[in-house]
Amino acid sequence: MATSPAWVLMSRFGDRVGKGIRVALRDAIVADVTDSTNRGATYGLRQSLDTIGAFTGPLSKLARKNPSILRNLNRVKVLTNDQ
């Protein structure tokens, strides 16, 4: 837990620098192993898998901590066409 705004600022700065290094290296590897005709599709697939992982990672942790959430998740109706 951060005890001052300075710790929050330093943590966020360090996180962003680390992400910048990781993303640049990952994109360079993707560009290196794909041909130019499929490069856009490859970046799109990489981004979609990253988004799926960002969603399912916390959801799986929450489901392991509270198994009843999966049962309750089926009861939630969000953005349905049934009225």
Image: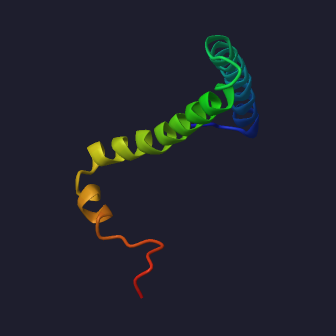
Q: How many marks?
A: 0
Q: Residue at x 39, y 47 (%)?
A: 59
Q: Residue at x 32, y 62 (%)?
A: 73
31 and 53: which one is in front? Answer: 31
**Residue 45, placed above or below residue 23:** below
10 and 50: which one is in front? Answer: 50
**Residue 21, placed above or below residue 5:** above
Q: Residue at x 42, y 88 (%)?
A: 83
- In the figure, is residue 47 to the left or right of 16? left
**Residue 64, placed above or below residue 74:** above
User: Which quadrant of the structure image shows residue 60?
Assistant: top left
Q: Residue furthest bottom?
A: 83
Quarter placement of the N terminus: top right
**Scheme of image coloration:** rainbow
User: Which quadrant of the structure image shows residue 26?
Assistant: top right
Position in image of residue 43 (x %, y %): 64, 30
**Residue 7, placed above or below residue 76:** above
- In the figure, is residue 23 to the left or right of 60? right
Position in image of residue 41 (x %, y %): 62, 33
Position in image of residue 17 (x %, y %): 74, 22
- In the figure, is residue 72 to the left or right of 13? left
Q: Residue at x 75, y 28 (%)?
A: 13
- In the figure, is residue 69 to the left or right of 51? left
Position in image of residue 42 (x %, y %): 60, 28
